[in-house]
Amino acid sequence: MFGLDITIVAIFALAALSTAGLAYGLLFSRIEAQKKTEIRVRRVQASETDQARAKVARDRMQELSKRRRSVQESLKDLEKKQQEQTKRVATTLKAKLAQAGLSLTPAKFYVFSVVFGLFALVVTLLAGAGLLVSLGVGFIAAAGFPRWFVGFLIKRRLNKFLEEFPNSLDVMVRSIKSGLPLTDALRLIASEGQEPVRTEFRKVVESQQVGLSVSEACARMFTSIPLQEVNFFSIVIAIQSQAGGNLSEALGNLSRVLRERRKMRAKVSALSMEAKASAVIIGALPFIVTLLVYLTSPGYIMILFTDPRGHIILGISAVWMSIGIFVMRNMINFDI
């Protein structure tokens, strides 16, 4: 009985195994086809996802490329405008008087120059100099000294502006971060800043009140303050107004760049100070030697001033000295 039960169980087991094998053999191709279909579906879905991601990335890159081209075109336009404005400013006496912070008109400046030249001419004649020498002194006093004085005032005013401009930018950054708009930040500098930054920002605010945009008003600042730092500032404002962006971060970076430029300029000035001192000594040496020879032996040196050949020698020496001073000046001056 026990052996019969084992035989029956074995028969049922073999039958079940045969049935399962037959079913697997019949359904194998369908199962494999279903698996392959599922794999293809997953691949298609992954491909569609990748294509969507690639399309999003491609659209983002195209947008960034368009924005970059727009910024580049804006920079080119601004550069052209700045070059035209620089040429116009460099040849205008009215602009130079404004850069010096003087309220004189060109007509008054010319009148003052002529009066000063006549005064120098009269003083030289009363001192006993000849007519030719007096005319030369009067011409230099009328045409050279006033312009040199205006240039001196311009340089001093620009240096003072460079000292205060980064601090004003930091105030603007803090104002914008606290929630104030750009126009209010400009008004804050125009009312609370230090001279000459306060005057220039007041002109920007007044230009906005007559209808100019912020970028145009800031670009006009270059007329009275012809510095690359002002050019950088106007470009930052123009790009932000056209392309958008974090203005406080851009102005903060500009402030750091201006401070680094100032440090570099001071470092270069300190390194070139020895060369400048040598140039001053070399340039002053002929005049010092002439003065010492005149004090010790007047008759020996006066022949240069009394003899026509001495006049020729003095003229040639003056030309060569001027060329040497010009060359040394270009060698020791660096633009940063």
Image (spheres, helix red, strand yellow):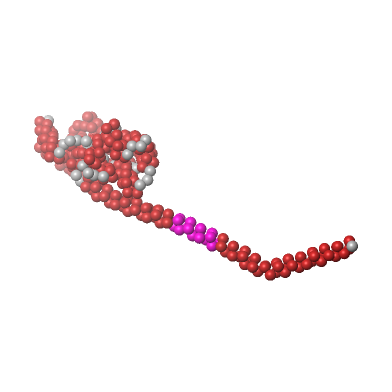
Quadrant where the image shows the N terminus: bottom right
Quadrant where the image shows the C terminus: top left
Instruction: Report if residue 37 is visible in the image.
Output: yes
In terms of depth relative to the viewer, which is nearer, 279 or 313?
279
Q: Does residue 35 lie above or below 137 as drawn?
A: below
Relative image position of residue 318 (x, y in whole percent): 22, 41
Relative image position of residue 111 (x, y in whole percent): 11, 37
Main secondary-structure element of the magenta-colored stretch: helix
Among the 4 quarters of the image, the one containing residue 13: bottom right
Relative image position of residue 54 (x, y in whole percent): 47, 58
Q: Residue at x 37, y 35 (%)?
A: 178
Please say whether residue 52 is one of the residues in the magenta stretch.
Answer: yes
* Position of residue 3 in the picture relative to residue 287 (left or right): right
In terms of depth relative to the viewer, which is nearer, 97 or 215?
215
Please say whether residue 103 is one of the residues in the magenta stretch.
Answer: no
Q: Does residue 155 lie above or below 16 as drawn?
A: above
Q: Give, as a single range, the part of the protein colored magenta.
A: 43-58
